[in-house]
Image (cartoon, rainbow, N blue to C red):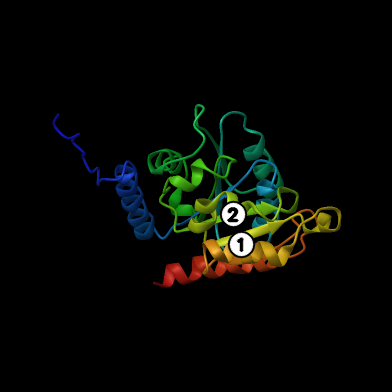
Amino acid sequence: MDPVKVIEIKKSIFADNDEDAARLRKELKEKGVFLLNLMSSPGSGKTTTLIQTIGRLKDRIRIAVMEADIDSDVDAVKIKEATGIPSIQLHTGGMCHLDAEMTRQGLDNVDLSQVDLVILENVGNLVCPAEFDTGAVCNAMILSVPEGEDKPLKYPLMFSVCDVVVINKMDVLPYFDFNLEKCKEYIHMRNPKAQVIPICAKTGEGVDAFAAWLLEQVCNWKQQ
């Protein structure tokens, strides 16, 4: 019997998306637009964190938001009503993530000549969004205290691809078995360079630090 033929597949199934993402990043750089990809599980407080952060930055840089969900326009409406900045809703048609082409379709509906920063609030889960490059300059994620300190161990890719991890809902820390220092240790096991910023989006505690981090990223990028 002839031996089984083994074929080595060396081209990544994500290669086409990676190429699209690289092109999109280049185009945004030419237009001077910084794209932030914000990820998390549902209920972590992404939208509330965005409202608090935008409130601290909108008088310093021009911002627009793209909200991605399987359905509804709840978050886009909430952002627009709370901050007054341009906000659009992206429906993914059942997809659990955005890729570069889907992100581009959203950006086609944003007046990029009028913004310095576009924040993409990705679909809420800790798996699929981490697998697809959206063309963003930076990736950020929010981990909330009720989710537990062990999430970096269970979802390694998400924490590996993020430049900053915001730990939200610090106000409920006394009520949950959550070890902040252990969580930081787990995050840095996956990504030694990741910034970790504890906040409470409800009260605003710590949001200044995240806003300062984001502003620094945008300004440094524009100067490169």
Please state if 46 lies on the left or on the right of 190 as rendered: right
Please state if 87 lies on the left or on the right of 99 as rendered: right
Please give the label number shown on residue 13. none
Between residue 170 and residue 12, name the one nearer to us: 12
The picture places residue 115, in percent across and down from the top left corner, at: 50, 55
Residue corresponding to mark 2: 153
Residue at 63%, 52% in the rendered image = 151
| Residue 214 visible in image | no
Disc 2 crowd rating (10 Å Cα; few below 14, some 14-19, many 20+) is: some
The picture places residue 206, in percent across and down from the top left corner, at: 73, 65
| Residue 97 visible in image | yes
Quadrant in the picture for the C terminus:
bottom left
Badge 1 vs badge 2, beta-carbon distance below 8 Å = yes
The picture places residue 127, in percent across and down from the top left corner, at: 53, 43
From this viewpoint, which residue is outermost toward the right? 175
Helix or strand or loop: what does disc 2 sit on?
helix
Query: Going from the N terminus, do you reach mark 1 or mark 2 first?
Result: 2
Between residue 43 and residue 8, name the one nearer to us: 8
Disc 1 crowd rating (10 Å Cα; few below 14, some 14-19, many 20+) is: some
Between residue 59 and residue 42, name the one nearer to us: 42
The amino acid beneath tag 1 is Tyr
Residue at 34%, 59% in the rendered image = 30
Q: Is residue 63 above or below residue 191?
A: above
Helix or strand or loop: what does disc 1 sit on?
helix
Q: CA distance from mark 1 to mark 2?
A: 7 Å
The picture places residue 5, in percent across and down from the top left corner, at: 18, 35
Q: Tell me how many marks there are.
A: 2
Between residue 112 and residue 223, name the one nearer to us: 223
Quadrant in the picture for the N terminus:
top left
The amino acid beneath tag 2 is Leu
Please give the label number shown on residue 186. 1
